[in-house]
Amino acid sequence: MENQFSSAFNTQVCEQLNAWLGGFEPILKKMKPGNFNWIIHVMLFFHTQNVHAKQKEKEKKADHNTSEDDEDNSEEESI
């Protein structure tokens, strides 16, 4: 039986995030727990903001390309 939460997680994304965070391991290991928690939260916040911005940019490009294709098709039909 499949775990009820398995569809809620994208394991590839989790692995990429862990790899990215792993680059900061030497710095994070030297921190006290309070500082560690704070910096991880800040890093995840900014990382999430960056990912959302990239997704929006990608969607805008896809919408722009779709609207150009529609215009090209309408011009071909009028000829």
Image: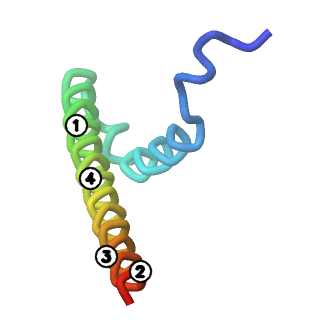
Which one is closest to the eye, mark 2 or mark 4?
A: 2
Say which label, 2 or 4, has the lower sequence index: 4
Mark 2: amino acid: Glu
Say which label, 1 or 4, has the lower sequence index: 1
For disc 2, the neighbor class at 10 Å (few under 14, some 14 to 19, many from 20) is few
Say which label, 4 or 3, has the lower sequence index: 4
Q: Which residue is mark 1?
A: 45
- Distance between the Cα atoms at labels 4 and 3? 22 Å
SS class, disc 1: helix
Q: Which residue is mark 3?
A: 71
Q: Which residue is mark 2?
A: 77
Say which label, 3 or 1, has the lower sequence index: 1
Q: Is residue 16 left or right of residue 30?
A: right
SS class, disc 2: helix
Which one is closest to the eye, mark 3 or mark 1?
A: 3
Which residue is painted at 51% across and 42% down in the image? 13
For disc 1, the neighbor class at 10 Å (few under 14, some 14 to 19, many from 20) is few
3 and 2 marks in contact (CB < 8 Å): no
Mark 4: amino acid: Lys
4 and 3 marks in contact (CB < 8 Å): no
Total numbered circles: 4
Which one is closest to the eye, mark 2 or mark 1?
A: 2
- Please tell me the numbered disc located at residue 2: none
Mark 1: amino acid: Phe
Mark 3: amino acid: Glu
x and y, in percent, of residue 51 in the image: 31, 49
Q: Is residue 24 left or right of residue 13?
A: left
Say which label, 2 or 1, has the lower sequence index: 1
